[in-house]
């Protein structure tokens, strides 16, 4: 392959890597992932605010420190220290996020799936009937119709 051909493919966006990237971006999952990241960021800010304003002062009060960063500090030789209070704050933050994700998202979806499985086992049809026809079936049908029309030949009217 020559350099000019490669450059022209890239300029026209016909390179296999570019085509793969376009297919990846056009999937619906990318949009869903972007929405999840935005919502997750906002949710993390909310949980961090709760941990910072509610739990950190409580833990700091238990250990008689001004803040969680000052709680459970172990001094090191020199001017450094190990701040276990900060780690505890991050752990509380993580556990709160994990609990909310589990109880608000995972648990309800699991219960919904179990209810659907029970309905299927009982023979109750689901609300949405999925058409089992695949793209290959549709393309085969189109091919057969085109072949049938080609065999019949053009129709002439007089």
Image (tube, helix red, strand yellow):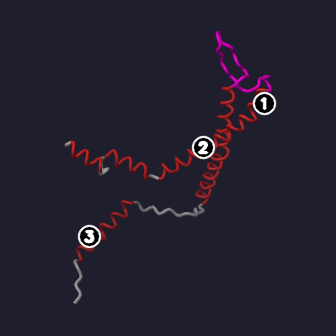
2 or 1: tag closer to the N-terminus: 2
Q: Which is in the foreground here, disc 3 or disc 1?
A: 1
- Residue under circle 1? 58
Q: Which residue is the extreme one toward the left?
A: 2
- Residue under circle 3? 147
Residue 150 occupies quadrant: bottom left
3 or 2: tag closer to the N-terminus: 2
Considering only vertical position in the picture, is 149 above or below 25? below
Q: Which residue is the extreme one toward the top?
A: 77
Q: Residue at x 37, y 64 (%)?
A: 138
Instruction: For marks 2 and 1, give the CA distance.
Output: 26 Å
Element assignment for label 3 = helix
- Residue under circle 2? 40
Residue 117 is tagged as: none
Instruction: For marks 3 and 1, give the CA distance.
Output: 78 Å
* Image coords of residue 31 (percent x, y): 50, 51
Q: What is the crowding at mark 1: few (fewer than 14 residues within 10 Å), some, or many (at least 20)?
A: some
Report the front residue among 1 and 136. 1
């Amino acid at each position: 392959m020559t350099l000019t051909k490669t450059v022209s493919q890239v300029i026209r966006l016909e390179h296999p890597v570019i085509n793969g990237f376009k297919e990846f971006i056009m999937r619906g999952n990318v949009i869903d992932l972007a929405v999840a990241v935005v919502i997750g960021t906002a949710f993390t800010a909310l949980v961090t605010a709760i941990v910072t304003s509610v739990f950190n002062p409580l833990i700091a009060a238990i250990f008689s420190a001004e803040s969680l960063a000052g709680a459970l500090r172990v001094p090191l030789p020199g001017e450094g220290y190990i701040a276990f209070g900060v780690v505890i704050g991050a752990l509380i933050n993580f556990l709160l996020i994990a609990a909310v994700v589990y109880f608000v998202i995972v648990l309800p979806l699991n219960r919904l799936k179990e209810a659907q499985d029970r309905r299927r086992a009982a023979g109750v049809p689901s609300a949405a009937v999925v058409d089992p026809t695949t793209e290959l079936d549709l393309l085969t049908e189109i091919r057969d119709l085109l072949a049938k029309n080609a065999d019949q030949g053009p129709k002439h009217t007089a």
